[in-house]
Image (spheres, rainbow, N blue to C red):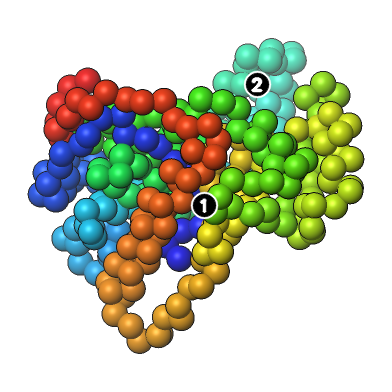
């Protein structure tokens, strides 16, 4: 599977973009590794390249109208213990020389200086974040469990394109109300059935309960709901094809195809990537409208067109 977790965004206007235009826009914001005192970096890399590929690999890969992108995030990691050790040594030395206790601000300045001095030697930690744009379906999907990473992906793409007309799915009602009702009545909309996990929270007392790998139709789960808890995270099955978990922010997690075909180890990597993207995009194209409709439907947007490079 291309990725198993996703933040979903809706394009509020139709987008027109050619592969060449998209490639050109992304190339201006390619990933540059951290260096010197730069603590982090975020930019585009090729979704089809690996460490052995040349640097001219494309920054986007289009399959059946879906544009696959890949961002790389790199952060230098300075151990807190190393900073604390340097701070203690410097503070002790200054206090002995000047015969006084340093102020909080002076200690903070020393801490900042210690961090800056250690940063050039710090080892970088990196990860890649896949996402795709499906203009025909008015969807932008970012494959991560982290909302900050999803926002970084969107912000970088917005800067690259000059504008990005997207919003979270504009569901008219509170998804948690529906999740709670489904748990209580065990009556789900067409195409959906309960999975085997949920999270419940009491909005007044703050108490919570988590159920994992268990039958959600049990009396135990209903007792939690009847005591005032609401469901904030629910496992679902869709059409017997896809198992996933959805939270109250409509983040999709732990996606798993129930009828996934086995892939030969010697299959062409690009062909496998194409197949994975096609399967995921087609499944989400069909599942997400079913889910949004089950949650009360979406607000409508204008049909104004947006061309790559247009200003908001």
**Other residues around mark 2 within 10 Å, as few (<14) / some (14–19) / many (≥20):** some
Q: Is residue 268 left or right of residue 127?
A: left
Q: Position of residue 152 (x, y in %)?
A: 41, 36
Dividing the picture into quadrants, the one containing residue 163 is top left
Residue 84, placed above or below residue 47: above
Q: x and y percent of residue 33 in the render?
A: 34, 49
Position of the N terminus, as image quadrant, is bottom left
The answer to whether the residues at label 2 and label 1 have Cβ atoms under 8 Å apart is no
- Nearer to us in this view, 172 or 104: 172
Residue depicted at 51% across the width and 52% down the height = 5
* Residue 5, numbered label: 1
x, y percentage for residue 114?
56, 33
Q: Is residue 16 left or right of residue 38?
A: left
| Residue marked by disc 2 | 107
Q: Is residue 215 above or below residue 157?
A: below
Q: Residue at x 18, y 30 (%)?
A: 306
Secondary structure beneath label 2: helix
Q: Name the foreground residue: 5 vs 15.
A: 15
Q: Which of the image's four quarters has the C terminus?
A: top left
When asked about the image quadrant of residue 80, the answer is top right
Query: Which residue lies at the image location 60% right of the left edge and 27% below the top edge?
Result: 174
Residue 113 in view here: no
- Using the image as rendered, state which of residue 200 and residue 267 is in the foreground: 200
Chain-order first, disc 2 or disc 1: 1
Q: Position of residue 196 (x, y in %)?
A: 72, 57
Q: Is residue 238 above or below residue 200?
A: below
Q: Secondary structure at mark 1?
A: loop
* C-alpha separation, residue under disc 2 versus residue under disc 1: 42 Å
Q: How many numbered circles does the render carry?
A: 2
Q: Which residue lies at the image location 12% right of the left edge and 46% below the top edge?
A: 18
Q: Is residue 134 above or below residue 308?
A: below
């Amino acid at each position: 599977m291309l990725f198993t977790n996703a933040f979903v965004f809706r394009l509020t206007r139709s987008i027109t973009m050619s592969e060449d235009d998209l490639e050109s826009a992304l190339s201006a914001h390619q990933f540059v590794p951290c260096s010197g005192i730069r603590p982090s970096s975020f930019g585009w890399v090729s979704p089809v390249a690996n460490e052995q590929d040349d640097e001219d690999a494309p920054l986007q890969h289009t399959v059946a109208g879906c544009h696959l992108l890949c961002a790389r995030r790199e952060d230098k990691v300075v151990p807190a213990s190393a900073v604390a050790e340097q701070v203690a040594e410097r503070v002790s030395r200054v206090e002995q020389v000047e015969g006084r206790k340093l102020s909080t601000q002076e200690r903070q300045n020393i801490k900042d200086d210690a961090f800056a001095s250690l940063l050039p030697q710090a080892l970088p930690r990196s990860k890649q974040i896949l996402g795709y744009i499906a203009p025909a379906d008015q969807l932008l999907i970012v494959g991560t469990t982290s909302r900050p990473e999803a926002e970084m992906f969107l912000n970088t793409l917005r800067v690259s394109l000059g504008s990005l007309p997207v919003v979270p799915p504009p569901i008219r009602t509170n998804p948690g109300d529906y999740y709670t009702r489904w748990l209580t009545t065990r009556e789900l909309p067409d195409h959906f059935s309960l999975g085997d996990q949920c999270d419940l929270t009491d909005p007044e007392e703050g108490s919570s309960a988590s159920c994992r790998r268990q039958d959600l139709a049990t009396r135990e789960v209903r007792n939690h709901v009847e005591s005032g808890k609401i469901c904030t995270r629910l496992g679902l099955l869709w059409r017997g094809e896809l198992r996933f978990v959805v939270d109250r922010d409509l983040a999709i997690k732990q996606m798993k195809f129930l009828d996934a075909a086995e892939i030969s180890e010697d299959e062409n990597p690009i062909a496998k990537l194409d197949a994975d993207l096609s399967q995921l995009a087609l499944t989400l194209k069909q599942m997400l409208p079913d889910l949004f409709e089950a949650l009360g439907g979406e607000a409508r947007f204008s049909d104004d067109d947006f061309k790559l490079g247009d200003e908001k």
